[in-house]
Image (tube, grey):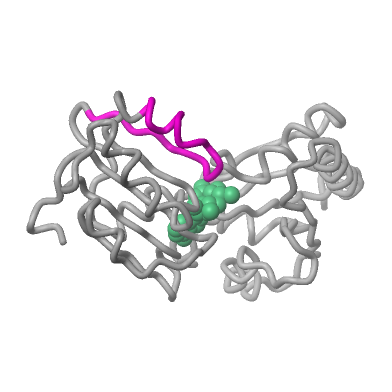
Amino acid sequence: MKSTAGRVIGIGIGPGDPELITIKAVKALKTADVICVPKAHAEKPSMALAIVKHILDERKRSPEVIELVFPMIKDESELKRSWARNANIIAEKVKNGNTIAFITLGDPMFYSTFIYLYQSMKERYPEVKLEIIPGITSLTACAASSKIPLAERDEAVAIIPSDIDSKQIEEMAKYIDNFVFMRGAQRLKDLAPILERAGFTKNSTTILAKRCTMPEEKVMIGKLVDVQSWNIYEDYFSMVIIKRSELQSNRK
Ligand SMILES: C[S@@+](CC[C@H](N)C(=O)[O-])C[C@H]1O[C@@H](n2cnc3c(N)ncnc32)[C@H](O)[C@@H]1O
């Protein structure tokens, strides 16, 4: 019999490879009553849902799957409205004692839509129990795919969202050893001179990792000077890692 107290579980489903999902996440996905799938566009198929499909297909009783649209816009008030709207939909389901699994790519607390849903639920429905199952992030997946360490010894790492301005990056580069640029493909060629002005060199290790652990994975590794000749196309699922240290010849 279902317990009367429902709950919401934010589940990290990893960077893309359906095998990179934790045992705890699999267990939760096998028993949840409702699976919530966040989407930026209502009409596009969900990559997150495709990643967990093999788990849901094994279930005797199919869960209810609801797709929630979280638009990728800057308008704060419109964004808040969409978080509140989605929190209301989930709260309605929780009322009936349901367990809701909210899936997110990578980890739920790392640049994820779940963060806003979580905040909105806490504000509007403080009585609802919220849990989080961490996932393997794109960050560590990209380091693994490139086989180049993200950080070692006393190196400091900075993670930079796609819209931080160049001046700020140049200032930070005086103190930071390794940079991770989220969605970095689009600005990689512009980053090279900025980092060089702040003490990185033409030989600094540079990685462009796209769709890591997915079937279309592509990883380019070179020196900072090389990127001007790279054939780069924009991809939302891209990450750039630039390390102050020089690329070792056995790494390429
Ligand atoms: C909104 S953030 C989501 C991050 C996610 N929550 C995580 O823990 O990895 C989306 C960004 O993550 C990065 N990303 C996500 N999956 C990726 C992958 N498989 N390969 C490369 N970058 C990825 C890209 O920079 C993309 O623009």
Residue 191 coordinates in the image, percent (x, y): 37, 46
- Left or right, 34 with reference to 85: left
In the picture, residue 131 is in which quadrant? Answer: top right
Residue 12 coordinates in the image, percent (x, y): 56, 50
Residue 184 is one of the magenta-drawn residues: no
Residue 161 is one of the magenta-drawn residues: yes
Residue nearer the viewer, 91 or 141:
141
Q: Please state the extent of the stretch shown in magenta in the rendering.
A: 155-172
Q: Is residue 170 above or below residue 202?
A: above
- Left or right, 205 with reference to 85: left
Residue nearer the viewer, 211 or 121:
211
Residue nearer the viewer, 60 or 119:
119
- Left or right, 165 with reference to 81: left
Instruction: For residue 22, say whether it is visible.
Output: no
In the picture, residue 232 is in which quadrant? Answer: bottom left
Q: Residue at x 72, y 51 (%)?
A: 72
Residue nearer the viewer, 115 or 54:
115
- Left or right, 125 with reference to 241: right
Q: Residue at x 53, y 46 (%)?
A: 107
Q: Is residue 193 above or below residue 21?
A: above
Instruction: For residue 140, say whether it is visible.
Output: yes
Q: Residue at x 50, y 64 (%)?
A: 234
Image quarter where the C terminus lies is bottom left
In the picture, residue 39 is in which quadrant? Answer: bottom right
Q: Residue at x 61, y 40 (%)?
A: 132
